[in-house]
Image: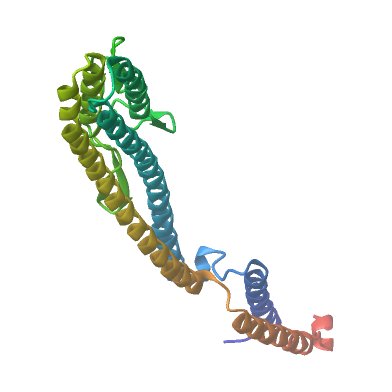
Amino acid sequence: MRVTSQMMSNTVLNNLAQNVQRMEKYQAQMSSGKRLNNLSDDPVALVRALTLRSTMEQNDQYSRSIDSAKSWLNTTDVNLGAVNDLLIRATELATNGANDTIGSEQRHAIALEVRQLLENAVQVGNSTYEGRYIFAGFQTDTAPFTLAGDGSSVTYNGDHGAIPREIGSATTIQVNTDGEQALTPVFDVLIRLYQSLEADDTKGISDTLNSIDAAIDTVLSARAEVGARVNRLEGSDTQISEVQGYLADLLSKAEDTDMADVITKLATEQTLYQAALGAAAKTLQPSLIDFLR
């Protein structure tokens, strides 16, 4: 096959263009810090990088869900702790009220404080987290407890729904505590103590002491359950953090530029480009015969 000057020119120009493209590719990798700037750079590595990013984004979502769950549970624990403190004070008041050395007027004064404890306990039972009632089950927009005007009863307006939070692949945890189960014994015993004090009934007052202890046990049990969930969440959070670090390392290996390698390749391409230009200048010099044609 006869090789013409035009064919030689096209070949040289095509090779120079490819050389320039490679230099642009390496310059882009250096300036961006990423070796995957186009699909053509490395299709397999790009797919792997996209998969890793998707997994990391999902883990970030789990981490946010864990943080929200921990905040809800910590709010619950603080409020249960407040109820526990109220019951401890109620024990002191019941012990004083059961003392035969005091009179009815003193018991009436104690009853007034117990009534304040009852109202305070109901207020705590209606606590919220981010505008949602934490002891109302699924009825998070409804105050779960209503105290009768005469202090004779507390009505539960919530339900027993368990609110889950997704903390991992196909893994959830309940963040709410059953308000009726945890707090109704508290309200009941405070109402009984209040009524016994108002009635100047020392035996009735004395009988509430065991019930107060039982209510404290119920609250402590609820707090223990909350604490166990928080511990589980912290363990999951630690695990996700470790996995994210591992995935970030894999992602870096998949898409980040190896500066030393790219600098070497760019220098090589620049050298080849200069050499190619020199060769092209000699190869493509027009001859006298070319001009005569």
Total label count?
0
Residue lying farthest to the top in this orientation: 149
Q: Position of residue 174 (x, y in %)?
A: 26, 43
Q: Position of residue 70 (x, y in %)?
A: 38, 47
In the rendered structure, the answer to whether residue 39 lies left or right of residue 115 reads right
- For residue 164, say whether it is visible: yes
Q: Is residue 121 above or below residue 174?
A: above
Q: In the picture, which quadrant includes the N terminus?
A: bottom right
Please tell me which residue is depicted at 18% across the width and 29% down the height of the picture: 206
Specify the quadrant of the image occupied by residue 145.
Answer: top left
Q: Nearer the viewer, residue 231 or 28?
A: 231
Q: Is residue 107 above or below residue 209?
A: above
Q: Is residue 3 above or below residue 241?
A: below
Q: In the picture, which quadrant includes the C terminus?
A: bottom right
In the rendered structure, the answer to whether residue 14 lies left or right of residue 139 reads right
Residue lying farthest to the front in this orientation: 101
Q: Position of residue 242 (x, y in %)?
A: 40, 67
- For residue 42, say whether it is visible: no
In the rendered structure, the answer to whether residue 221 lies left or right of residue 54 reads left
Q: Position of residue 210 (x, y in %)?
A: 16, 35
Q: Nearer the viewer, residue 154 or 50?
A: 154
Specify the quadrant of the image occupied by residue 197.
Answer: top left
Q: Nearer the viewer, residue 205 or 153?
A: 205
Coloring scheme used? rainbow
Q: Nearer the viewer, residue 138 or 45?
A: 138
Please tell me which residue is depicted at 38% across the width and 29% down the height of the picture: 127
Please tell me which residue is depicted at 23% across the width and 23% down the height of the picture: 193
